[in-house]
Image (spheres, rainbow, N blue to C red):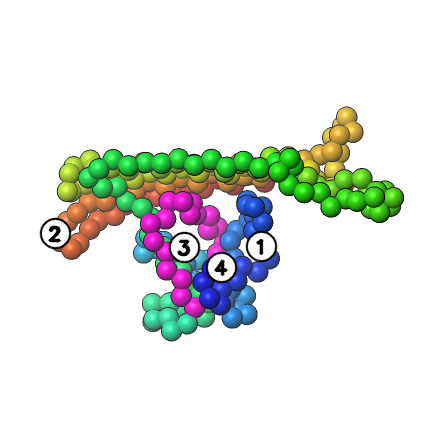
């Protein structure tokens, strides 16, 4: 959504709050018909050109291209075209990890005295939200065969308004994403390269 003309209708992310939501992109008021390619493979819903089922670990991206106009004949739709490449392993071993956390102790609450007088005593506070992941890549055969792997886990727990547990305490809604990527790169005769890529996604709601 940082690309000129691109928007995410109905998916405004505030502090990571769109966990479990399928990303949506539009350009110049066109709500659907975006076209997404990952490692050269089309991942859009082929029927209506939407993002149905696309959940990506953006920390594992090496490169991404977003284009809204003047698309070539390889883009069969009118919406934004997104082309992404996953990171690859190299002759040296590299890896990394990340962790982020937030909860009701790190967010504000707009329930004031006026609302309390109307019987509204609390909102739906965030109980916890974490975003954790890591990646690692390197060589299998120097200058010939490399590997890369990544994983990401994003759980979120939020109080649900009007929902109560048997003991009377507020009920909570849990949703999460688990995303893994595995990639093997094999250098054929220059400049040809053979790439195997697998992604696995689990969504809890």
Which is more N-terminal, label 4 or label 2?
A: 4
The vertical placement of 166 against 58, above or below, is: above
Q: Residues within 10 Å of mark 2 (few under 14, many from 20)?
A: few
User: Residue at coordinates 52% horizontally, 57% vertically from top-left?
Assistant: 24
Q: Label 4 to label 1, Cα distance in Å?
A: 10 Å
User: Residue at coordinates 30% horizontally, 42% vertically from top-left?
Assistant: 183
Q: Label 2 to label 4, Cα distance in Å?
A: 38 Å
Of badges 3 and 4, the one in the foreground is 4
Which is more N-terminal, label 2 or label 1?
A: 1
Please tell me the numbered disc located at residue 189. 2
Of badges 1 and 3, the one in the foreground is 1
Mark 3–mark 4 CB contact (< 8 Å): no
Q: Residues within 10 Å of mark 4 (few under 14, many from 20)?
A: some
Q: Label 1 to label 2, Cα distance in Å?
A: 45 Å
The vertical placement of 189 against 181, above or below, is: below
Of badges 2 and 4, the one in the foreground is 4
Q: Label 3 to label 4, Cα distance in Å?
A: 19 Å
Task: Provide the residue designation for mark 3.
Answer: 43
Which stretch appears magenta?
51-68
Task: Provide the residue designation for mark 1.
Answer: 12
| Badge 3 element | loop
Q: Position of residue 74 (x, y in %)?
A: 34, 67
């Amino acid at each position: 959504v940082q690309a000129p003309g691109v928007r995410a209708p109905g998916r405004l992310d505030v502090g990571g709050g769109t966990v479990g939501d399928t990303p949506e992109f539009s350009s110049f008021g066109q709500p659907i018909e975006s076209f997404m390619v990952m490692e050269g493979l089309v991942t859009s819903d082929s029927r209506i050109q939407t993002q149905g089922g696309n959940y990506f670990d953006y920390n594992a991206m090496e490169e991404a291209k977003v284009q809204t106009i003047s698309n070539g004949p390889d883009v069969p739709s009118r919406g934004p075209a997104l082309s992404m490449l996953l990171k690859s392993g190299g002759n040296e071993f590299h890896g990394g990890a990340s962790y982020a956390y937030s909860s009701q102790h790190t967010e504000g609450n707009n329930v004031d005295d006026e609302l309390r007088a109307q019987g509204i005593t609390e909102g739906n506070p965030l109980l916890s939200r974490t975003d954790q992941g890591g990646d690692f890549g390197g060589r299998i055969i120097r200058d010939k065969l490399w590997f890369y792997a990544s994983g990401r886990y994003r759980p979120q727990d939020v109080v649900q308004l009007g929902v109560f547990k048997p003991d009377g305490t507020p009920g909570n809604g849990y949703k999460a994403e688990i995303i893994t990527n595995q990639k093997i790169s094999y250098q054929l005769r220059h400049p040809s390269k053979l790439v195997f890529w697998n992604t696995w996604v689990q969504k809890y709601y």
